[in-house]
Amino acid sequence: MAQVCPACAEPASEGDWCEACGADLDGAADTALSHASSDPCVSCAAPSTDIAADGYCGSCGHKQPDIRDHLEDDQGWIVMVTDRGKRHHRNEDFGAVAQVGSNSAMVVCDGVSTTDNPEQASLVATTAALDALVESLKSSAEIDGGVDGAGDVAAMQAAVRAGQDAALQVPQVVGGKGSPSCTFVASISRVTDTGVQITVGWLGDSRAYWIDGLGVASQLTTDHSWAYEQVADGLMTAEEANADRRAHTITRWLGDDAHELEPGIAVHHLPTNNPDASPEASPEGSSEGRDTSGRLLLCSDGLWNYADTDEAMTAQLEAQKGDSLLALAQNLVRFALDSGGHDNTTVAIADIPGPESQVPASQEPEPESPEVPESLEVPESPEVPESPEVEDVTSD
Amino acid sequence: MTDFRAEVFQNEYLNEGADVVDAVITVTASGGGAGIAAPPSGQERVEVIIIDCSGSMNEEGGLKMRAAREATMAAIDTISDGTLFSIVAGVDGAYALYPQEAGAVARAAADTREAAKSVVSRVRAKGGTAIGTWLSAAAGIFNNVPNSINHCILLTDGKNQSESDRALNDAIAACSGLFQCDARGLGTDWNVDELRRVSNALLGTVDIIPSPSEMEAEFRALTQAAMGKEVGAVALRLWTPQGSKVEFIKQVAPNIDDLTTKGAPVKALTNDYPLGAWSGDESRDYHLRIRIPVGNVGDERLGARVMLTIDGVEQPSALVRAIWTNDEALSTRINREVAHYTGQAELADAIADGLAARDSGDGATATMKLGRAVQLAHEAGNGDTVKLLEKVVEVDDPKTGTVRLKKQVEDADAMALDVRSTRTVRVKKNS
C-alpha cells in the first residue's frame, strides 16, 4: 500500500481507493496517467464520457491535462511541488513527502526520458522509497528513550533498494529504449537525543541542499553526472565540462539491474544546545532564533539548471521566499518556469527539525498521524540547532 | 491466425500555429501462411477470369488469342482446390464460358479444371470491347456467393470502344467494394487511363503485358497471389477530430493508390477506408495528411486514431499525435518515412506530367519533368523506375537530372513507364 496516493499525493487511506481523488491505489501507476476526473474536456467542453481512457478527447482530440502536470502537497512545515515545465509534454518527475512526529522523509525522482516509461519508474520508485523511510521512522519512534539515528544509513540503503525493486517492475517496451529508469534523492531528518540527524541518499543529478538559518544554501549531494566526474577527475574545468553536450548525462540511476547500486549517502548532525553559535553564522543584527533554524531542500535538475551554484541557489531562496513554506516551493518552481521551464521541475522542502520537537517525545500523543501540525510556526527555541556539522560527506 | 498491426511514423511536433499533420502508417499482417492459404472458416474464395475475346485478339496471326487461351489455362491450373471459379469471355457483352450458365461458379477440383480448360481451349475471338459489361457480369457472379473473398483478373488488348465512358464509370462504381480486380493490357492498343480507373477503384493493380509470350507467367503469378489472400475485408478506420479535414490518405507502398475519396462514415468523426484482401504475410504503407484546428504551444492533440478492422472487427489502435512547440529543433525535424513517400509521390507526378508533356509535344517541359523523375528515382533507389525512364530519355547525369528526350521510343516502353510510375520502393529501415 502506497503511503501517499500517487494520483493526487494526498496521504493514502487504508483500502483500495484514494478517498481524496478516487484513484485506484492498486493500479495507481496506470490510473495516475489517465484522465481520472469527471470533468468535461478542457478544450471543447465535450462531456467526460467522450474522453477516452488514454486521455484524448473523442471530439476535439485534445489531450486532457495529466494529473501529474502540476501537483502540490502542503503539510505546513513540509511541502512538495512538481510541475511539467514548458517544454516537455508530460511530467516524468515525481516527489513525495511524509512526516512522522517531528521527523520527516522526502523523496524526489526524475524519470530518465531516454528510457521506456520513465514517468512510471519515477512514480513507483518514489512511493516505494518513501514507504520504506516512513516505516523506519515509525519503528524507531516506538523505542522509548534513546534515539540515536544510527540505523538511518541502513534505512536509506533499504529505501534505495525498495525504489530500485519498484522501478524494475515497470514494464519495458519490446524493442524500446531501455529499462525504465529515474534519478533518486531522498532524505530523513530525525530528532535524536543529541540533536537532529539528517541522512541524504542519491543516485544521479537530483540534489539536496541544506539551507541554514541565514538562508544560505549548501549542496549536500555531488551529482552523478558526466560533467561532475570530468571536473572531479581533473580532466576539465567546470566551464568546459558544463559546455559539453554530455554534461547532463547521468552516471548512476535507479532501474537498471546491470549495475551495482552505489548511492551517495551523506549524514549530517545538527547538535542541540549549542551555546556558542559560530560567529560566521551569526551576522550582526540577526536574531539568535534565525541562526538556529534550517531547512532541507530536495530538487530535480529542472530547478538547479537555473541556479547551479550554492550562491545562485541562495540568491533564489531569498528572491522567491513567500509567506509560507508552500509559497517558497511554488515560487521556486515558478522561477524555473519563468527561466524557460525546459525540464520537469520538482521541489520538496522541510523545516528542520519539525515543529513538534518542542514537545517532549513522551507527551507526543499520536506521533504517526499529525497531518496538521499543532503549530505551523517555525520553532525559534534556542534548543534547535544551527548549521550542521558534516560528519560524513558521502559514501562514494 | 493472421495478426494485423499498425505503426505510425511521424514528427508529432508542430511549430506554433501549424495545422498540418503528416504521418506514415505501416500496416503489417503476420502469422499467416505465405503462398496458398485457406480462406477463414465459413468464407469462400471466388476467382473470376475475364478474357478479352474481341476481334483484335485475332491479330498477329492469332498469336494473341492463342496466348490468352494458354495463359487462362495456366491460371485455371493455379486455382487451388475448393476455390469457386468462373471464366468469362468479354466482347460487346460478357459470356459465361465455364460454367456456361451466367452467374454460376464451379468448385475447383481436377474434373472442373479439366472441363474449364477444355472450353477455354476452343474459344474464338470475335466482336467488340465493352469492359463495363464485363465488370457487371463479374459482379453478378460474386453477388451469388455471400461472405466471400473475391478476386478478378481482367485482360484486354484494346480500348473500351463498344460502350460509353459513362457506362464504364457506372459499372466500376457499382463493383466498388465487391471485389478486387487486377487489370492487364496486352500489347499497346489499350488505354492506360481506362484500366487504371478500374484497378484504382477496385483496389487492384494495372500493368502492361507487352508481348503475348509474357502472358502465361503473368496470369499464373496473379492467380497465385490471389490464392494467398486469407483475410478478405480489411479496412483502415480513422477517427479524426472535430473541425479537421483529411487532406489525403493514400497507399504509398507497394504502389501509390489514393484512398481519400473511398472513406465511408461508420460513426461520428470516424471513416473506414477499404484496404482489400490481404495475405497472412505482407506489409503496406499509407501516407495520411490531415489538417486540424491549431492548439496552443504545449498542447497535445490527437490528429487521428488509426484502427484496423478485420471483417468489421476493430483491432487495437495507433495514434497520430500533434504537440505544438516553439522549439524549432523539435518542429523542424524531418521524419524519414514521411519525407521518403513525399518524394515517391513527387516522382510519380513528375513521370505522369513528363509523359503528358511529351505526348502534347512540349519537349521542354517533358525534359524538365522526366529529368526531375530520373533524379528522384536515383536518389531514392528506385532502380526499376530508373530503367524504365532510360528507355524514354537519354540520361546524361542522374544526380542533377540532366536528360535528353529519345527520338525513337517504343510505345510499349512509354506505356510501361506510365502504368508503373506509381510503383514505389519502401523506405530503408534503420536498425
Image (tube, coloured by chain):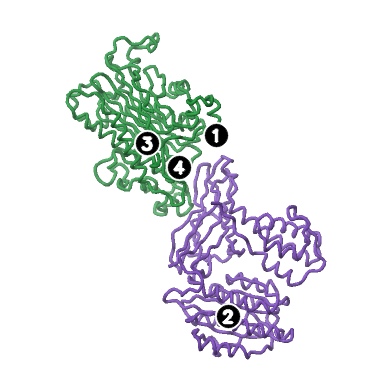
**Element on which disc 4 rests:** loop
* Amino acid type indicated by mark 1: Arg
* Amino acid type indicated by mark 3: Leu
Q: Nearer the viewer, residue B63 or A309?
A: B63
Residue A348 image position (x, y, % from top left): 37, 30
Q: Which mark is residue B75?
A: 2
Asked whether the residues under marks 3 and 1 belong to the same chain, the reply is: yes
Q: Tell me the crowding category of disc 4: few under 14, some 14 to 19, or many 20 or more residues within 10 angstroms, Cα based.
A: many
Q: Which residue is mark 4?
A: A90
Asked whether the residues under marks 4 and 3 belong to the same chain, the reply is: yes
Residue B412 image position (x, y, % from top left): 73, 72
Determine whether A329 is above or below B363 in the image: above
User: What is the C-alpha distance between the residues marked 1 and 4?
Assistant: 23 Å
Q: Is residue A393 left or right of residue B163?
A: left
* Amino acid type indicated by mark 2: Ala
Which image quarter is the C terminus of chain A in?
top left
User: What is the C-alpha distance between the residues marked 3 and 1?
Assistant: 26 Å
What's the chain of the residue with tag 1?
A
Q: Which residue is mark 3?
A: A261
Q: Choose the circle earlier in sequence order: 1 or 4.
A: 4
Q: Which residue is mark 1?
A: A245
Determine whether A7 is above or below B142 in the image: above
**Element on which disc 1 rests:** loop
**Which numbered disc, 2 or 4, marks the residue closer to the eye?**
2
**Which numbered disc, 1 or 4, marks the residue closer to the eye?**
1
The chain coloured green is: A
What's the chain of the residue with tag 2?
B
The answer to whether marks 1 and 4 mark residues whose Cβ atoms lie closer than 8 Å is no
